[in-house]
Image: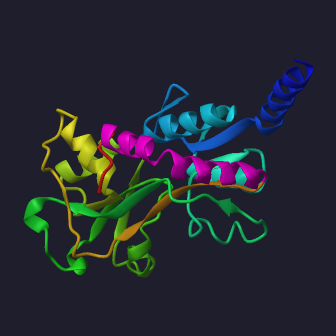
Amino acid sequence: MKYFTLLISLCFLSLHVQSKDLTVGVEDIEYYPIYESKGGVYGGYARELLDGFAKKYNHKLKYKPLPIKRLFSELINETVDLKFPDNKYWASDLKKSKEVKYSAPALEYIDGALMPPSKIGQDKNNIKKLGIIRGFTAWEYLGDIKSGRLKLSEVKKMSQLMLLVKSHRVDAIYFNVLVARYFLKHNDDFSVDLVNFDKSLPHTRDHYHLSTIKHPDVIAQFNEYLETHAADVAHLKAKFELEL
């Protein structure tokens, strides 16, 4: 009996040592169904994925919504424990002074040009004005933007981005294809075919990751969770219509 009691105590101690109170820096933007922050409350696919992981490993997560640029600064200054989403290519110059650890892919995404169906298949040079969410970077169009050939219209919200197209103030928008598709499908203020993704134009296909400087052990646990709970992750992607 004493041995059994000791064993239970050691198991409890092990769980206690592994569990952590963690602050997750997240983007304070409308990006549903992947994530969103409404009234300071974080939600969407990312929230449910991270909550499922935290429950498995007895972590307590506090979500801290921040503007995109400030979020990178807080990661580098280690005022947040984790950042989601992240990618090794984002703000790479800012990260040079730190060793940032990235998780395995948490979600695949495509960012590209979306435009009215009548304009699909045209040359990239036909895009003179491009709408974008403030804080995002249209990587494939940076040369055109820097040269002045392409003019940017920056807004804060997805609805504002769609209004730019609807009012013919831009030729195309640069955005996440899955988020734009979901928004139009579930929003009665806009036609579902207001914009379509033109896959013939330059675009980025990559993955979102969880990142940290302070807790590489948590990243290792998250990787384990993604592998051992692959069916649950797939169910979440289907639930939020995030299958490419």
Percent of width and height locating residue 183: 27, 41
**Image quadrant occupied by the C terminus:** bottom left
Identify which residue is drawn at 18% across, 55% down: 195
Percent of width and height locating residue 243: 30, 51
212 in relation to 33, above or below: below
Q: Is residue 195 left or right of residue 13?
A: left
In which quarter of the view is residue 240 placed?
top left
Q: Is residue 2 left or right of residue 155?
A: right
**Image quadrant occupied by the N terminus:** top right
132 in relation to 189, above or below: below
Identify which residue is drawn at 78% across, 39% down: 18
Q: Is residue 240 magenta?
A: no
Percent of width and height locating residue 196: 18, 58
Percent of width and height locating residue 224: 60, 51
In front of the other: 92 or 1: 1
Q: Is residue 35 left or right of residue 61?
A: left
Kindly give the residue lying farthest to the front in the view shown.
Answer: 1
Identify which residue is drawn at 78% across, 65% down: 98
Magenta segment: 214-239
In front of the other: 159 or 181: 181
Whether residue 67 is visible: yes
